[in-house]
Image: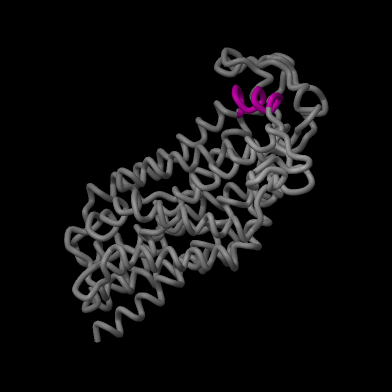
Amino acid sequence: MVETLLAIGIVASVFVGFNIGGSSTGIAWGPPVGAGIVTKTTAAALMTVFVFLGGWTVGRNVMDTLSGGIVTTELSLSAGVAILFFIGFGILIANVFGVPVPTSMTTVGAIAGLGLATDTLNYATVSRIVSWWVVTPIIGFWIGLVIGRYVYPVVNRRVDIKKSPGPLLRLDRDGGLPTPALGPNTTWTELVSTVVVLVIGCYMAFSAGASNVPNAAAPLVSGVGGLPDDTAIGIATVAIGVGGFTIARRTMESVGGELSDIPLLAALFVMTTASTITTVLSYFGIPISLVMGTVMTIVGIGWGRATRPVTVQEAVSRSTGDNEIVTGAITVSGDEEEQSAPIGEAEPEAVLTAGDLFNPRAVLKYVSMWIIGPSVSTLLAYAFFVFVPGVA
């Protein structure tokens, strides 16, 4: 019986990990793939490696919270398997609405539903987790705002990330021993910028592993007959990797288009900020959604870029004079972006008419899923464990 239950749990874990790979790989590697810096296959391979590293190291802290911190008793294997199905159901709902699923939040909600049904909920831990769910979007927004207002325009005037035709590197066979050399059209600037893009993509994959591997692995390590931590992490990683090599290929093509048509440089700022927030919170055992930091950093950069025509004093006093706050311009690059006016002065017409920085309806849909996802998983899990108490 235990072996059969464990086999069912492994199948559910693979399903969850597979879908996580499809979503997270697109978020982490969509911008570099879209810029032609890395292929989809290479992106999926790097994603698999660094997801494993994130889950194997920092992710263990999140696993401890999920498997023993949200409820005051250890999860049974049967309860863990049931929770995996609720996570999978949450992923299905999010896929229907076409938004990245807040997997960590859905997982916490399902375990919290079990705790409510069995009167074993650790309210202190849940309150701490939920408080970070509230604070994280605010942190992402304000960091993004500072970047968009003060940092991005300056850096964008000095850094131009482009992919030249031909290979990035080649083997120089003129000497006795072949040595790496720059490609026929590669400059040192392009080589350095490409390395930076790859490092940031790997960093985001690491943070995705730290936050998402535990969602597929933690329910399998609970109770009598559960898997060892290392085995569960390995299974979750393989499933995420398979998702990255398959269904993520389409996600990598389309990611970011609904929220904002931002250039690669702005995407790198977003990726670095969201990854840092997620990794730090995962280190402290807080289950957090990588999508949450990503979305709100995009919004923050947009608003920061849009408020450049007014000074801080004008914004506080609400006296903007002739300068209008316009949600546009982050999509501008090249010569037009170099025309960005100093803070407090009106932007050039080319900048002001560049288009919206983000789609408010899309942001509302994402934020709604942050509320609906864990709420639905909590209610469904609560009802299930109330009516089927023997599973818990």
Instruction: In the rendered view, tell whether residue 103 sits above or below residue 76.
Output: above
Report which quarter residue 181 is drawn in: top right
What are the residue bounds of the magenta stretch? 148-158
Front position in the image: 163 or 147: 163
Instruction: In the rendered view, tell whether residue 217 sits above or below residue 209.
Output: below
Q: Is residue 362 left or right of residue 83?
A: right
Is 106 magenta? The answer is: no
Residue 117: x and y in percent read 24, 66
The extreme front residue here reads 176
Q: Is residue 35 left or right of residue 116?
A: right
Q: Is residue 51 left or right of residue 186?
A: left
Instruction: In the rendered view, tell whether residue 386 sits above or below residue 209.
Output: below
Q: How is the image coloured?
A: one colour
**Residue located 17% across and 62% down the image:** 73
Quadrant holding the N terminus = bottom left
**Residue located 71% across and 23% down the image:** 324
Report which quarter residue 268 is drawn in: top right
- From this viewpoint, is residue 295 visible? no
Residue 175: x and y in percent read 68, 43
Q: Is residue 178 left or right of residue 292?
A: right
Number of on-image labels: 0
Residue 51: x and y in percent read 45, 55
**Residue located 73% across and 43% down the image:** 183
- From this viewpoint, is residue 344 visible? yes
The extreme left residue here reads 73
**Residue located 63% across and 52% down the image:** 30
Residue 354: x and y in percent read 78, 35
